Amino acid sequence: MSRVERLIAIGPRAVAAAISGLVMVLICPPIGLTWLQWFAYVPLLWALRDGPDRTNAKLGYWFGWTMLFSNFFWLADTVVIFSSLPYALSIGVVVLFATVWAIPYAMVFGSARWLRARLGLSWIVIVPALQVANEALWPSLFPYYLGSVQYRSGALWQLASVTGVAGISYLIVFTNCALAEGLYRLHEKRRPPLGVYAALAAVIAGVLAWGSARYDAVEAELSEAPVIRAAILQQAGSMEDWLTKSAWQALQSWVVLTRQLEELEPDLVVWPEGSIIINPDDEKDYRALGGISPREFFSRMVSRGDYDFLIGGGTIELHDGTTSDGRQRFTAYNSCYMFDRAGELGGRYNKMVPLPFGEYLPLADVFPILRELIQGPGDFKAGEEVTFFQGSLPDGDPYVFTSPICYEAILTRQMWKMRDTDLFVNITNDAWFGDTAAPHQHSMLAAVQAIEHGRPLLRVAFTGISMIVEPHGQILYETEPFVEVVKAEELRMGRIETLYARGGWLFSWLCILGSLIGVVTARMRATPSRT
């Protein structure tokens, strides 16, 4: 068969694989047709054939590439805003991203027919495990589990409190594989796998019944939990607009919004990541602040309003000496500061995981020429430890909260370090992503942490999406992006212990082990097995 004939033969299969990848745009937020995900990968699995394995691997790769390129196309807009690269080259960044991160999908889905030929019906158990292993092991800037998109699914979503979102990824891929097995048998003129369908229906029904009961039980517990009034402040302008403002204009814009809160009597006020560019603990007096220091300014504001206050902003620590171009040496951090109700400074947290290509340029210290070629990324240093802030309930009792900054809230390993807390306060500035799908996807991934760790999540984003997520995953309040918001919403301070936090994260490692055993067993099979 000539190359042209091979291309013609594989054409419909490539289209089917691409459909499975492209449909993720409809499944993921902001569109959110999550019901499609339960059979979205069937076209890809239908496209696979019994040998040659290399062709199946290419189809699996093509699925991953189309899914990543379409779903993360917002990266092009972000790169333009963050750096000096033109739009055409920014699209090249997305192409490169998809080209590299699609590699594991060649193994996960490309191996389906190979596993079926050697392990029989067991393939529908191994392929989902391979996908979970991919999500757990493959390095990623954005840990985007397939199961994350089910974050609004109520009873089903409760499974994440046991296995983490990886368990939902497994169940979704398992369902798709089971449906594909029926197509394979129909093509082979064999009886459908009725036993598999019965087991699948029983599992899903069991998860939904248990999830509904758990949701009600957590809801009953939350009804008895103490309540604080949490402020949601959000700006409407684009990042380009904000970059034209002076430091004092930016500060004043947040002050104006905060003063509108006074009659709402909030207990906790949060200004998001990057809301100011001055050190809040600076004790130098400034005329723009009426002749007082930033520290005194915020202290007076907070004590007058009687609320705890978290403020996101940069920190500049000056050092002795100058750089080669004559500038004073300094270290910059992406930080947040907390002032208690009495106006006392309650501590500072420095972001521990700066965003590559945004807050720092990888390898720039080794290859300084990179700073000349790619202008725009900052030079922030990483913090060293989590800061536990202490707020106070309306009755004066204390509570502890931590504040992961920006995409730290979607890094599960990072959140493990914050288990000894009553509340997650995630501050972020998603205006950098523009009016794209990114703010919706970012907030989705942050919402995962509430149910996995059983803590309420208050997310305050510069231009949205801001939200309150309760410990059972219910989104209590949510804003639209690029809309000015001044609200004070009730937040129930329930602390729910989860099996995931106690060890359910081992589910991913069990999938890694199971997939390894499955692949090794398949390789040892000299004779293909009949399904």
Image (cartoon, rainbow, N blue to C red):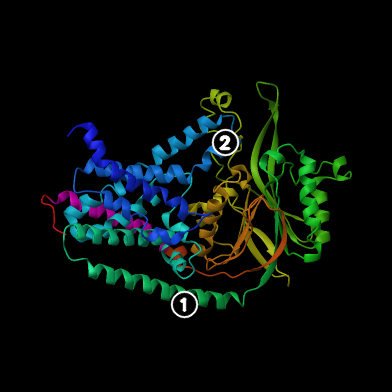
Per the image, label 2 sits on a secondary structure element best described as: loop
The structure residue drawn at horizontal position 76% and vertical position 39%, both measured from the top left corner, is: 245
Q: Is residue 129 visible?
A: no
Q: Which residue is mark 2?
A: 360
> Which is more N-terminal, label 2 or label 1?
1
**Marks 1 and 2, how far apart at CA:** 46 Å
Residue at 17%, 53% in the rendered image: 117
Three-letter amino acid code at the position of disc 2: Tyr
Horizontal and vertical percent for residue 113? 22, 51
Residue positioned most to the left: 527
Q: Which residue is at 16% across, 61% downward?
A: 189
- Residue at 56 percent across and 29 percent down: it is 86
Q: Which residues are magenta?
A: 504-525
Q: In the image, which disc is placed on residue 213? A: 1
- Classify residue 425 as left or right of residue 145: right
x then y, percent, for residue 352: 57, 46
Q: Position of residue 530 (x, y in %)?
A: 13, 58
Q: Residues within 10 Å of mark 1 (few under 14, many from 20)?
A: some
In-front residue for pair 228/115: 115
**Of the residues shown, which amino acid type is indicated by label 1?**
Ala
- The answer to whether residue 194 is above or below residue 184 is below
